[in-house]
Image (cartoon, grey):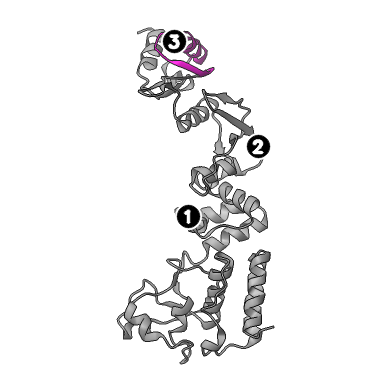
Amino acid sequence: MSLAGQVKLQLQSVPEGGVITSRALHKLSPDSQQVDKAASRLYKTAGLQKLRNGIYYRPYTSTFFGKLPPEEERIVRSIKQQYQAKVAPSGELAAYKLGLTDNLPDNISYETNKRIGPIQLDNLTLYFRKVEGKKLVSVNGGLLTVLRALEFLYKEEGRLTVLQEQRIRRLLSRFSRGQLDKAIALWPVWFQDKVKAFMQGVEKPYITGLSALNIPHKGKQADWHQMGMLHRNKFQVAGKNYDSAPNLQDTELFDCSTFLRKFNVDVGTILCATPLRAMKDILFSSIIRKSQYPGFFMLDQFMFDITPSEMKQAIDELRPLADETQKQLLDTWMHDNELE
């Protein structure tokens, strides 16, 4: 079969809503220029339309809307193939695509390492902006999308909602610690710190929060609701259902396996936060993560063997993570607990 016949056969095989690139047809002949010319000459006879030079598609026929162009994702994949380009959604678009915001951007913009002109569809224009730097070519595409979205949200909103944080945490959990560390090294320190806050506790789950205060540490128990916790069998575990403040140290954890065996409890870990670490996680979860005042956690309700200076130091370590509202909440909690 002639080259033209082979090209026409490939073009005719494109399904409704499908896209084909001339680069994908280069396998038919070592003479890529002849392949490109044949595709450009024959696409109309095969019932296709041209998206741009070298990219062709078969419209999808809708009962209500007539002939429609391909889905955006298919177009982007064809751009990657035809131009041998790295392409990733802008931060604003990434946040929308990941369900972190309901606001569709005014401009549908992608970042790329090649010069690619905009693509005009019936009611939509796709823009491609060439960017420099290593992020686009060095970071896994899925992870780059998550990080771009997170960066956009922090720059635009200053902080995340609880639902956004939960969604980001789930998305980041799909990647290894090594992937995350390597990727965020390409971002400024302020952003690295934000991402590390999501990474804490994932690899080393431990009991924390009020649950930890109900487990004896060095023979002393800070809370007195132990039996209620055991009866409900609900434990707050960092890395599973509770937030962990950044910069976890091994000295902030202890082995509570004896306690767990005594009451036949299995929570997937034998590690427990020390009272000071549990306090820090409670303030981090309530104030830094949720911007809520922890009225349930007042020091006079607990039996802490922690000095005020140790508590102040733990709170000072949270301040760089806080916005102005959260700093005020920390100050208020310190004042109400006479730690000023």
Q: Position of residue 127 (x, y in %)?
A: 60, 30
> Horizontal placement of 108 versus 133: left or right?
left
Q: Which of the two residues, 165 or 247, is positioned nearer the viewer here?
A: 165
Label 3–label 2 contact, CB within 8 A: no
What's the residue at 56%, 63% (across, down)? Answer: 197
Q: Amino acid at mark 1?
A: Arg
Circle nearer the N terminus (3, 2): 3
Marks 1 and 3, how far apart at CA: 45 Å
**Displayed quadrant of residue 304:** bottom right
Identify the element where label 1 is drawn: helix
Q: Amino acid at mark 2?
A: Val
| Residue found farthest to the left | 264
Marks 1 and 2, how far apart at CA: 27 Å
Q: Position of residue 311 (x, y in %)?
A: 62, 82
What's the residue at 45%, 24% (across, down)? Answer: 69
Quadrant in the picture for the N terminus: top left
What's the residue at 43%, 84% (across, down)? Answer: 214
Q: Which residues are magenta?
A: 31-53
Q: Position of residue 33 (x, y in %)?
A: 52, 13
| The label number, if any, that marks residue 167 in the structure image | 1
Q: Which residue is mark 3?
A: 44
Q: Which of the two residues, 222 or 101, is positioned nearer the viewer here?
A: 101
Q: Which residue is mark 2?
A: 131
